[in-house]
Amino acid sequence: MAPSRHTALREQIREARNLPGTYRMLAEDGEVLYVGKSKQVRTRLLSYLRAREGEKAHRILGDAHTISWEYDPSEFAALLRELELIKRFRPRFNVQHKRDGRYSFLKLTAGPAPRLFVVHSVADDAATYYGPFRGGRRIVEAVRELNDLLGLRDCPVSTPIHFADQSEMFGVDRTPRCHRWELKLCAGPCAALCTLDDYRRRVALARAFLNGDADEPLRWLNERMIAAAERWEFEYAASVRDRMQRLEALRDEFSRLREALENLSFLYPVPGVEGDDRVYVVRRGTVRAVVAAPRTRRERLALSRLVAEHFDHPEPEGALVAKHQVDEILLVARWFRAHPDELGRTIPAGKDGVLPLIA
C-alpha cells in the first residue's frame, strides 16, 4: 500500500471513537470490500495498520481507498448490523454469511419427485430446508436409510421423471436408471413405476418423520427385525437393528434441534452505551423486534403488546426454518454460546415472562 494512502487512512481512523459498531472498507469506486464489527471500533481499525504482509487485514487495507463506520449501542447490536450489511453488500473479503461449516441441512427439493439429501449451505431456491444441525457422516447415512425405506429417489435432480399415471402419446417401455428399484429401495419415478400420488405420500411421510409426527419408518424396521429374529436370521436382524438405530439418531437429532430453537425464545434486555438500552424480542433464534428499553408504564404495556404479537401465533412445526433465518439463528446461537452469562439476563417469552416488565 502506498505510504500516502496509508497516511490518509490513518487520518480517517483518528476520527473514530472506541464505541461498539460496524465498519466498511471501500474501494476507490465505492465497492464495499469488507464489513466488520467491534466493541471498540477505533482500536480495531488501528489494528489494520499494524497488519503484516500476507495477513488478511493487510490485503484488505491494500485494496481499500477509504473507511466508513457507524456506531451501535452494544456489541450484540453491532453483530446483528454486521450480518445485515454482509447480506446487503456481499463483500468479496467476507466469508459469505459467515456460516459455521460444522452445521448441515437436510434439503428436500421442489418439483413432482423431490429428493432428500444433506447439504452444507442454504441456496436461494424453491427447496425446503431442515436445520441447522450438527452431524457429518452419520447424518448422511441416516438420510440414506430414510430414502431407502420410503423409496425416495437419490438420482440427480436433472433426471427425467415419468409417473405411471402420466399420459403419453406413444407407449414407451422405460427402464430404471439405477439398481435401487430392483433392490426395492426406490419407487422408480424415473421409469413410470409409481404414480404421482404414491410418490407424494412417501414425501409426506418423510416430512412427518422429520417433524416428529410419524414413527412408521421405525415401526416398519422394528417389525422386520422381530420377524428376522423369529426366523433365526440373526445376522439380518442385527443389520436391521443398525438401520433402525441410525434413523433413531436422526430423529433424536431433530428433536434436539427443535428443543434448541424453542429455547432461543425470550426477551433479551441489553444495556447500551450512553444509556441507549434496548430490548430484543427473540423467537426461535431470530430477532423479531427491537425497541428501546421501557422506562414508563405506558412503554412497558406497549412492549407487552408487541411480545404478544410475536408469540401469540403458531410457528412452523418441527425443525423447519425459513432460508432467510438460518444465518441469524446461527449468529444468535453462537453469541449465547460464547457469552453464557448473557442467558441469565433473558426473560422467558410468554405472558408470565412479561409480567416483571409491566409490574
Image (cartoon, helix red, strand yellow):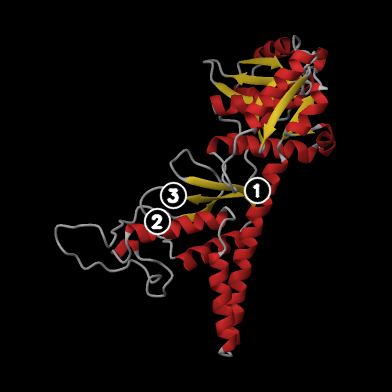
The residue at 55%/58% (across/down) is 209
Q: Position of residue 4 (x, y in %)?
A: 66, 12
On the image, numbered disc 1 is attached to which residue? 258
The residue at 61%/66% (across/down) is 246
Q: Is residue 54 visible?
A: no
Q: Looking at the picture, tell me which residue is in the foreground, 217 or 299.
A: 299
The amino acid pointed to by label 3 is: Thr
Image marks 3 and 2: residues in contact by CB distance under 8 Å:
no
The relative height of residue 16 versus residue 125 in the rendered view (above or below) is above
The relative height of residue 315 versus residue 139 in the rendered view (above or below) is above
Q: Looking at the picture, tell me which residue is in the foreground, 353 or 106.
A: 353
Q: Is residue 186 visible?
A: yes
The relative height of residue 73 versus residue 212 in the rendered view (above or below) is above
The relative height of residue 83 versus residue 126 in the rendered view (above or below) is above
Between discs 3 and 2, the one toward the N terminus: 3
The residue at 63%/64% (across/down) is 248
Q: How many marks?
A: 3
Which residue is situated farthest in the left direction here? 170
On the image, numbered disc 3 is attached to which residue? 109
The amino acid pointed to by label 1 is: Arg
Q: Which mark is residue 337?
A: none
Q: Which mark is residue 200?
A: 2
Q: Quadrant of residue 309?
A: top right
Judged from the image, the secondary structure of the residue bearing numbered disc 1 is helix
In the visual, does 126 lie left or right of 300? Answer: left
Between discs 3 and 1, the one toward the N terminus: 3
**Mark 3 and mark 1: span between their CA atoms?**
21 Å
The amino acid pointed to by label 2 is: Arg
User: How many C-alpha atoms fall within 10 Å of the one at disc 2: few (<14), some, or many (≥20)?
Assistant: some
Q: Quadrant of residue 75?
A: top right
